[in-house]
Amino acid sequence: MSVHDIHIPHRQLPLRVSWDSPEPDSPDADRRYGDHALMLGTLSILLFWTFGAGLLVGYAALIAGGMSTNSRSNIESASPIPVEPFLGMATGLIGIVTGAAFLVIIHDQM
């Protein structure tokens, strides 16, 4: 008997782990981008001084907020659009403006 002959059964893990996230086909699936937009917008403000990283994260916040507000499920549903996408887009825009201003100030001092 060799090591290769020993079979140790393993547990099968679930294919999908869920932390109360919406199902992919549910109407709330596209609204999760609003939370992503808010997170990315806040991160862009925090990263404005990192020579362009705040700009990229701010653009990602604008894209995620736009995806959340322009989804078909939000248009077809009777419930109002949540405020998170708009806050995320606003904070992303603040991150873009502060990051660009930082790059201009640093460039002028060099």
Image (cartoon, rainbow, N blue to C red):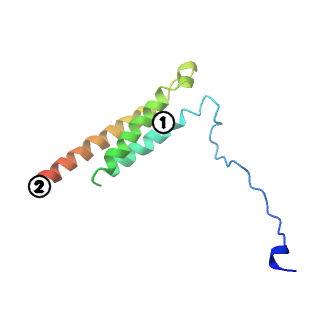
Furthest residue in direction right, as rendered: 1
The disc placed on residue 48 is none
Residue occupying the point 42% across, 44% down = 40
Callout 1: helix, strand or loop? helix
Percent position (x, y) of residue 60? 40, 41
93 and 103: which is toward the camera: 103
CA neighbours of label 2 inside 10 A, class few (<14), some (14 to 19), many (20+): few
For residue 96, side relative to residue 77 (left or right): left
For residue 89, side relative to residue 33 (left or right): left
For residue 24, side relative to residue 82 (left or right): right
Q: Quadrant of the N terminus?
A: bottom right
Percent position (x, y) of residue 44? 35, 47
Residue carrying label 2 = 109
User: In the rendered image of this protein, does residue 23 appear above or below residue 77?
Assistant: below
Percent position (x, y) of residue 100? 23, 44
Observer-side mark, 1 or 2, equals 2
Callout 2: helix, strand or loop? helix
First of labels 1, 2 by sequence position: 1
Residue occupying the point 52% across, 23% down = 80
Residue occupying the point 43% across, 31% down = 66
82 and 106: which is toward the camera: 106
Work out how far the residue at label 1 is from the one at label 2, CA to CA, in angstroms.
37 Å
User: In the rendered image of this protein, does residue 98 appear above or below residue 9?
Assistant: above
User: In the rendered image of this protein, does residue 42 appear above or below residue 30?
Assistant: below
Q: Quadrant of the C terminus?
A: bottom left
CA neighbours of label 1 inside 10 A, class few (<14), some (14 to 19), many (20+): many
What amino acid type should be assigned to the residue bearing mark 2? Gln
Residue carrying label 1 = 34
